[in-house]
Image (cartoon, rainbow, N blue to C red):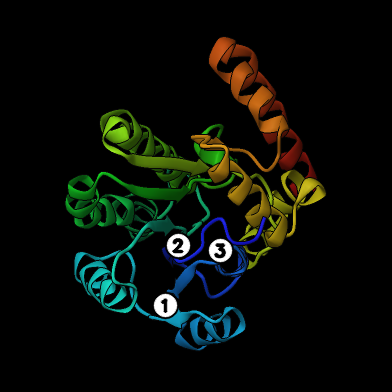
Amino acid sequence: MTGDFDGQGVVVTGAGRGIGAALARAFAAAGARVVVNDLDAEAAHTVAEECGGTALPGDAASAEGLSALVAAARTELGEIDVWCANAGVAPVGGADAPATAWASAWEVNVMAHVRAAELLLPRWLERGSGRFLATVSAAGLLTMLGSAPYAVSKHGALAFAEWLSATYRHRGVKVHALCPQGVRTDMLASTGAVGEALLAPTALDPADVAGATLDGLRAERFLILPHPEVAEYYRVRATDPDRWIAGMNRLQQGLERSAAL
């Protein structure tokens, strides 16, 4: 559907590659004016050129970086209609993961969303409209073996998105949580054997995830699930947690056996 986001100002963080780049292209194709943000300035400019958007590279997690990005995006767009909090990190490790990994996951995967909302909400509430899209991952609904910092922080991202929607829906702020499983990106590649075993077999192309995302926005769905089977996994996790945890533990044991071979 071309043109249904016509003229809207959209900011996509972490848009130099992967899901973010695909979202930038999809919004542009639907008529939006797109700001492409990424720490990798060259990648941001490349995607912006491809989709006719504007590159605003920089940090989209720190308070200072977000303040600068929001101000520059408003100068470019006039107003921000859609904020795509897509930037994320996926450090590996468990309880023994270094403190820096935990801090990074919390800052980028959770606090970046909180800080962006703090800056965006006053104008959105004043005018009675605004849209916040959080790239959460199915890990936020379920878990992610091999990466405790990722699983925990993505649960936090989902919780914040739920809170935003419950608190401001009646005032015109629309919130969505994008929760794909495996997507063929550099992040999936970085998960190594765990990602290859658990996620790669059903991984989607970023363009497919972006298409499902825009469909979810049009349908006003809070949870956007490019992998429909995640809904059933989530149901089992909620209604029979012991069964769910037992199943995940069997997967963990299988990973350990494979690693020992």
- 27 with respect to 228 (left or right): left
- Residue position marked by numbered label 1 in the rendering: 39
Image x and y of residue 27, in percent: 56, 63
Check disc 2 and report its element: helix, strand or loop. loop
Q: Earlier in the sequence, mark 3 or mark 2?
A: 3
Mark 3 and mark 2: Cα distance apart in space: 17 Å
Q: Residue at x 74, y 59 (%)?
A: 205
- Disc ID at residue 207: none
In the image, residue 107 sits, relative to residue 256, either above or below, namely below
Dot 2 alpha-carbon crowd within 10 angstroms: few under 14, some 14 to 19, many 20 or more: many
Judged from the image, the secondary structure of the residue bearing numbered disc 1 is: loop
Where residue 44 appears, as percent x and y from the top left, is 49, 81
Q: Position of residue 148 (x, y in %)?
A: 48, 43
Q: Disc 3 on helix, strand or loop? A: helix
Dot 2 and dot 1 residues touching (CB under 8 Å):
yes
Camera-side mark, 1 or 3? 3
Residue tagged 3: 27
Q: Nearer the viewer, residue 173 or 19?
A: 173
Tell me the distance, in whole angstroms, between the alpha carbons under discs 2 and 1: 9 Å
Which sits in the foreground, 23 or 111? Answer: 23
Q: Nearer the viewer, mark 3 or mark 2?
A: 3
